[in-house]
Amino acid sequence: MPAMIVLLIHGALLTIVTVLTRFAFLTGAMTASSDNVGSIRMTEAQKGHGWLRFDVSHGVFEGTYGYPPFVFWLASRLPQRFWTRARYWMNYLADTATTLLVWMAILWLVPTQPPEIALLAALAFGLNPLFLPTVEHARITAPNARSLGLLLNTIWIGLLVMCIAGGGVR
């Protein structure tokens, strides 16, 4: 089988497995006791504003919060009926993108190894119990900035490695 077809199959497999693993927890997450009330308030605070707001009113504690609001700001751009699902899906898609970036980084850093090694390593990363609700309940069962933060941090580290290993970003 041509190498490009193998890589496309591996990428599709990683995407499907990573999303479905997280999707399996979506139903319980939306009915479970979690940070949902707080995340709804954070989304409401972002609605109707041109850019990020760090202040929250109508809460137990009013004032400026250091909590990353970008996920809530993105969700607030949608109709309110989609807020809950959109915030979960943003987490799931960020986790999937991070897993794909790890896979591509392994392929790039160790090109002499069979692509199945990169696939297995990326699966181990994407299915790490620390990223699933079994251990880190709030990471998947409540809309938050953890998944997007991991994605942005992975991109930053990848760019740093590219600069060091390749003499710059091309």
Image (cartoon, grey):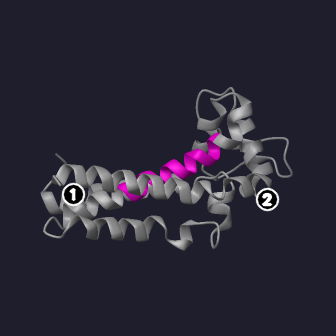
Q: Check residue 98 for magenta coloring.
A: yes
Q: Which residues are magenta?
A: 86-100
* Spatial CA span between label 1 and label 2: 41 Å
The image quadrant that residue 41 belongs to is top right
Magenta span: predominant SS is helix
x and y percentages locating residue 15 in the rendered image: 43, 52
Residue 136 is left or right of residue 170, and the answer is right
Image quadrant where one finds the C terminus: top left
Q: Is residue 84 above or below residue 14?
A: above
Q: At x 63% / y 40%, what residue is drawn? A: 86
Mark number, residue 32: 2
Q: Check residue 79 for magenta coloring.
A: no
Residue 139 is left or right of residue 6, and the answer is right
* Closest to the observer, 118 or 144: 118
Q: Amino acid at mark 1?
A: Met
Q: Is residue 168 above or below residue 134?
A: above
Mark number, residue 162: 1
